[in-house]
Every structure is written in C-alpha cells, then in structure tokens.
Image: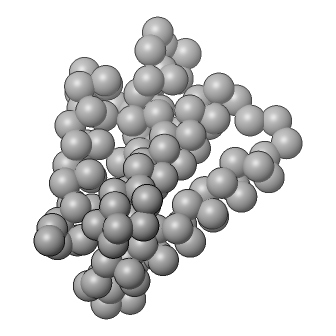
Amino acid sequence: MQDPLDLLAQARARAEADLTAASGGAPLCRIDGRDGAATVKHAEGRMAALAEAQRAARTHGVVDTVSLLALVQSLLEAWQDAADASLDPGPSWVAYRQGGITALGDVSDELSALLGRR
C-alpha cells in the first residue's frame, strides 16, 4: 500500500511543477491581468492547498491514511467555505480557490481509493 504522506508529497510536487510551467518562472505577484493568469492562479491554488495539507499533517503528527483523509476533507471544506463566503471575487481569486479545491478533492479521492472507499 502506498504511504499516504508520499501520495500527498507527490501531488504537491506535480502541482509545483505545473505552477512553474504555467507561470514560466515569472513572479506570481505580477501574473494578474496577463493572458493565462487564470491557469497560473489555479496552479498556485493547487500548490498552496497541498502545502497547507502537508504542514497540517506534520503539525498534527498525521501518519496514517484514515487520519490524513479526515484532515484533507476538513481542509477541503474550509477552502469551499472560503470560496462560498466571498461576495465579489475576481477571476484570479476564483481560479486560485478552485485550484485548491480541485487539488484537495483529488487527494481525498486518492486516499479514499487506498482505503477502498470509492
């Protein structure tokens, strides 16, 4: 069985590579307004959400699949709540939040599959 923390690390590494490819190495603070900004912000949101999951797993000493799945689902709910709470989000913010929601949802699905819970 795959180590759940390795699964999370691999997802973050993919997100980081996607962010670098999407941004072309440009500073993220200068992406808004540029063609492809939504793609970059989506990739940035994916990486940020997965980094947050890794930090939370370390902070809480999570090492097993069941606990990591619960943590990821809790973060997914928080990211969804933040997206729902915004009154007038701009397109970059929406793309960023959606990237995080997508990444956490994908990891949640992968962890559920490890547990045979699809």
Q: Quadrant of residue 24?
A: top left
Can residue 53 be seen in the rendering of this structure? no
Q: What residue occupies the far bottom of the structure in this picture? A: 61
Q: Position of residue 79 (x, y in %)?
A: 60, 57
Establish if 76 lies above or below 55: above
Colour convention: one colour
Establish if 80 lies above or below 46: below
Quarter of the image with the C terminus is bottom left
Q: Position of residue 59 (x, y in %)?
A: 36, 85
Q: Position of residue 6 (x, y in %)?
A: 17, 66
* Residue under the point 62% across and 36% down: 93
* Residue under the point 27% across and 33% down: 18
Quarter of the image with the N terminus is bottom left
Q: Is residue 84 left or right of residue 1?
A: right
Q: What residue occupies the far top of the structure in this picture? A: 35
- Using the image as rendered, state which of residue 115 and residue 79 is in the foreground: 115
* Residue under the point 47% across and 76% down: 71
Number of marks in the rendered image = 0
Q: Is residue 65 left or right of residue 13?
A: right
Q: What residue occupies the far right of the structure in this picture? A: 87
Q: Position of residue 15 (x, y in %)?
A: 29, 42
* Residue under the point 47% across and 34% down: 42
- Using the image as rendered, state which of residue 16 and residue 106 is in the foreground: 106
Establish if 2 lies above or below 97: below
Can residue 103 be seen in the rendering of this structure? yes
Q: Is residue 38 left or right of residue 20?
A: right
